[in-house]
Image (cartoon, rainbow, N blue to C red):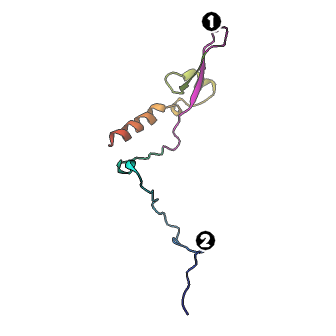
């Protein structure tokens, strides 16, 4: 009796032991010759904080709304009010990791 293989991908078990397999990314176009680096920073604390100016502008509108990265140097009072640890607001660490990634090329 001859063994028949199924065309159904659900019935085919290419990796029955569920071992990790390296992902394959198809390369096409001129960008395929460039080296790429993907970095995943788990628990990276990048939080935007809304900064508003209290003064009204000349045309009577409310102050400008701006956003800044929450950091331990400039926003100690805000972090203390919300009961958060200032060590958690360190976007400079994420920035340093990004700089190291760019220098790897």
Of residue 59 and residue 36, the one placed in the foreground of this image is 59
Percent position (x, y) of residue 64?
Answer: 60, 16
The residue lying at 61 percent from left, 71 percent from top is 10
Percent position (x, y) of residue 31?
Answer: 39, 47
Q: Is residue 27 above or below residue 52?
A: below
Q: Is residue 11 above or below residue 44?
A: below
Q: Is residue 54 above or below residue 87?
A: above
Q: Is residue 69 magenta?
A: no
Tell me the SS state at disc 1. Answer: loop
Q: From which residue to which does the magenta span run?
A: 41-63
Tell me the SS state at disc 2. Answer: loop
The residue lying at 51 percent from left, 70 percent from top is 15
Residue beneath disc 1: 58
Residue beneath disc 2: 10
Q: How packed is label 1: few (under 14 Cα within 10 Å), some, or many (20 or more)? A: few
Q: Main secondary structure of the magenta part?
A: loop
Q: Is residue 58 magenta?
A: yes
For the view shown, which residue lies furthest in the top direction? 58
- Name the quadrant containing residue 60: top right
- Specify whether 48 is left or right of 30: right
Q: Give how far apart the Cα atoms at labels 1 and 2 are.
A: 66 Å
Q: Are marks 1 and 2 in contact (CB under 8 Å)?
A: no
Q: Is residue 38 above or below residue 47?
A: below
């Amino acid at each position: 009796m001859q063994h028949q293989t199924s065309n159904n991908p659900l019935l085919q078990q290419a990796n029955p032991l569920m071992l990790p397999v390296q992902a394959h990314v198809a390369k096409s176009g001129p960008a395929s010759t460039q080296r790429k680096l993907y970095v995943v920073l788990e628990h990276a604390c990048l939080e935007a904080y809304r900064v508003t100016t209290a003064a009204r502008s000349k045309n009577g509108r409310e102050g400008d709304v701006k956003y800044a990265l929450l950091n331990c140097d400039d926003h100690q009072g805000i972090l203390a009010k919300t009961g958060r640890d200032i060590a958690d607001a360190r976007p400079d660490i994420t920035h340093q990791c990004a700089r190291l990634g760019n220098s790897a090329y």
